[in-house]
Image: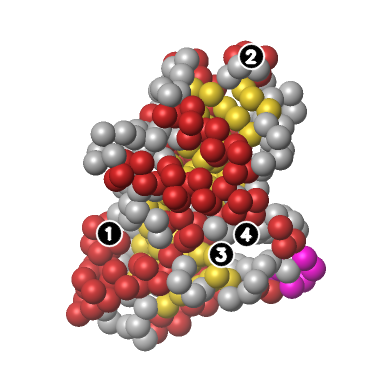
Amino acid sequence: MAVKRMIEAIREALDEEMARDPRVIVLGEDVGVKGGVFVATRGLIEKYGPDRVIDTPLSESGIVGVAIGAAMNGLRPVAEIQFADFIHPAMDQIINEAARIRYRSNGAWGCPVVVRAPYGAGIRGGLYHSQSVESFFAHVPGLKVVIPSTPADAKGLLKSAIRDEDPVIFLEPKRGYRAIQGEVPDGDWVVPIGPARIAREGDRLTAVAYGMMLHLALQAAEQVAGEGIEVEVIDLRTLAPLDRSTILASVRKTGRLLVVHEDNRTLGMGAEVAALVAEEALYDLDAPVRRVTMPDLPATPFAAVLEDAVLPDTQRIAQAMRDLARE
């Protein structure tokens, strides 16, 4: 297997799916000649032409609306939003239209559209290029929400998303586009949407994370392993539907739960995971659930020192693991 960066794995998935299925199209701002703001679609217009790799006006609502219409007419659109921060004008199309088509047609129609968007902080992007929007969409029945953490998962999960009969929000941790490398299986590598992954086995406590935070949680787990604290780290991969059984099985084994995400603290995925464990495994817990998250801020600070101060980092996660293990 070749070692690839996450952005290369995403490009490979798009290329392979466009070659496999002529119904797959890509649309978004600058996805054609420029190849996208992060060059995820570089080279696709030369291979598949402007009818399948479509540069759009600066209108996120229009991009997703066109994608929904194309999906309803038999195509498999992949809509790119340049940054997750820009996705909000398209929320009406995503939530009021795409997410409800299966339900309102009594199961007769699907809406096979993928909305890709880079998300998250840590690149000095400031207020409008750093947001974590996953909880907004994970709250909506009818949507699948996927966040890969590794290049292999980025490729395999994106291929599954494109083949899905219903809408998928595919959020990519842009801080890891070029920072995260890993082996990517050749050929038609597909990872199913839904199951989480045990990224590291342990028996002292369970840490649940996704996206870039998964890698920081793994680094923290390695730090505290030297102190005799073996942490089981779960990579959620898919936020909706949530793999409840994997989370519960791990917590029942370890008796302790830590959730890590870079989204705001209140009503984030950590709250949902904590509620799940409180409802289903309360008497298996040996200590209260803990969270390491961004504080509740209107936006990520622009100043580097402030961004570093509010983002979860390896040291903060490791300390939370130590504190939880002592309880």
Residue 190 picture quarter: top left
Label 2 belongs to which residue?
Answer: 49
- Classify 10 Å Cα crowding around label 2: few (below 14), some (14-19), many (20 and above): few
* Looking at the image, residue 20 lies above or below residue 96: above
Residue at the image position 39 percent from the left and 84 percent from the top: 326
- In the image, the segment drawn in magenta is 302-308
First reached walking from the N terminus: tag 2 or tag 1: 2
Contact (Cβ within 8 Å) of mark 2 with mark 3 = no
What is the spatial separation of the Cα atoms under label 1 and label 4, in whole angstroms?
26 Å
Contact (Cβ within 8 Å) of mark 1 with mark 4 = no
* Looking at the image, residue 131 lies above or below residue 169: below
Q: Nearer the viewer, mark 2 or mark 3?
A: 2
Amino acid, disc 1: Arg
Residue 258 picture quarter: bottom left
Q: Nearer the viewer, mark 2 or mark 1?
A: 2
Label 4 belongs to which residue?
Answer: 131
* Residue lying at the far bottom of the rendered structure: 327
Image location (x, y in percent) of residue 186: 46, 23
What is the spatial separation of the Cα atoms under label 4 and label 3, in whole angstroms?
9 Å
Amino acid, disc 2: Gly
What is the spatial separation of the Cα atoms under label 2 and label 4, in whole angstroms?
32 Å
Relative to residue 216, is residue 121 drawn left or right?
right
Residue at the image position 30 percent from the left and 54 percent from the top: 243
Label 3 belongs to which residue?
Answer: 262
Magenta stretch: includes residue 305: yes
Amino acid, disc 3: Glu
Label 1 belongs to which residue?
Answer: 244
| Dominant secondary structure (helix, strand or loop) of the stretch shown in magenta | helix
Which secondary structure, mark 1? helix
First reached walking from the N terminus: tag 1 or tag 3: 1
Q: Nearer the viewer, mark 1 or mark 4?
A: 4
Amino acid, disc 4: Gln
